[in-house]
Amino acid sequence: RLWDEEHAIYFDYDLVESAPIHAHVAAGFSPLFANVPTMKQATRMLDKLNQCGFCPLDEHCYAVPSYDKLEPGFAGQRYWRGPIWLNVNWLLYWGLRRYGFDDYAARVKEAMILLPQRAGFYEYFDPDTGRGHGSDRFSWSAALLIDLLSEGGESS
């Protein structure tokens, strides 16, 4: 019930309304981490990631924002409505690796390493400027960077 064929993403589901929540969020790519999509679905998800609302491979962006920048609900500094979260990008990185999408995975990894180098270990980051927001010296940001630098925690 979560996979949306038309939009090539997994949507959240509202149990009270018994309906999908049609918000194009980066968490909709997290099933890649858990090896849920078929290869065909995963390839379509990569195509969606590569569109200008998230983070196209051939354009500059700081990392994958939490919300599609072209959707009406996007707000770059509104917590889960647009900022970059390293934990979401970490799930995305390992999911992309799992499916062999190494070029895009390398880009996500590079972006995740550069953000804290430039801005510090913040809770989340502005998708347009890369500026850190929320708590500084945020432990999961530091832990995820350590994981990436050590290539530890590989899931199989």
Image: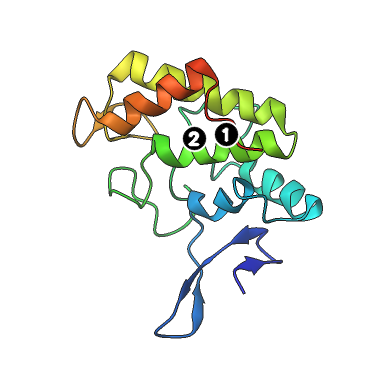
Residue 58 lies left or right of residue 15; in this view the side is: right
Q: Which residue is disc 1 drawn over?
A: 93
Q: Which amino acid does label 1 sit on?
A: Tyr
Closer to the camera, 75 or 100? 100
Name the outermost residue toward the bottom. 17
| Crowd class of label 1 (few under 14; some 14 to 19; many from 20; radius 10 Å) | many
Q: Which residue is drawn at 65% across and 37% down?
A: 96
Q: How many numbered discs sit on the rendered protein? A: 2
Label 1: which secondary element: helix
| Crowd class of label 2 (few under 14; some 14 to 19; many from 20; radius 10 Å) | many
Q: In which quarter of the image is the N terminus?
A: bottom right
Closer to the camera, 46 or 95? 95
In the rendering, which numbered label is found on residue 90?
2
Name the outermost residue toward the left. 135
For residue 114, say whether it is visible.
yes
Q: Which residue is drawn at 39% across and 59% down?
A: 73
Q: What residue type is labelled 2?
A: Trp
On the image, the x and y values in percent for residue 100 come to 75, 34
Q: Quadrant of residue 104?
A: top right
Q: CB under 8 Å between callouts 1 and 2?
A: yes
Q: Which residue is drawn at 34% across and 49% down?
A: 75
Judge whether 94 appears above or below 21 on screen: above
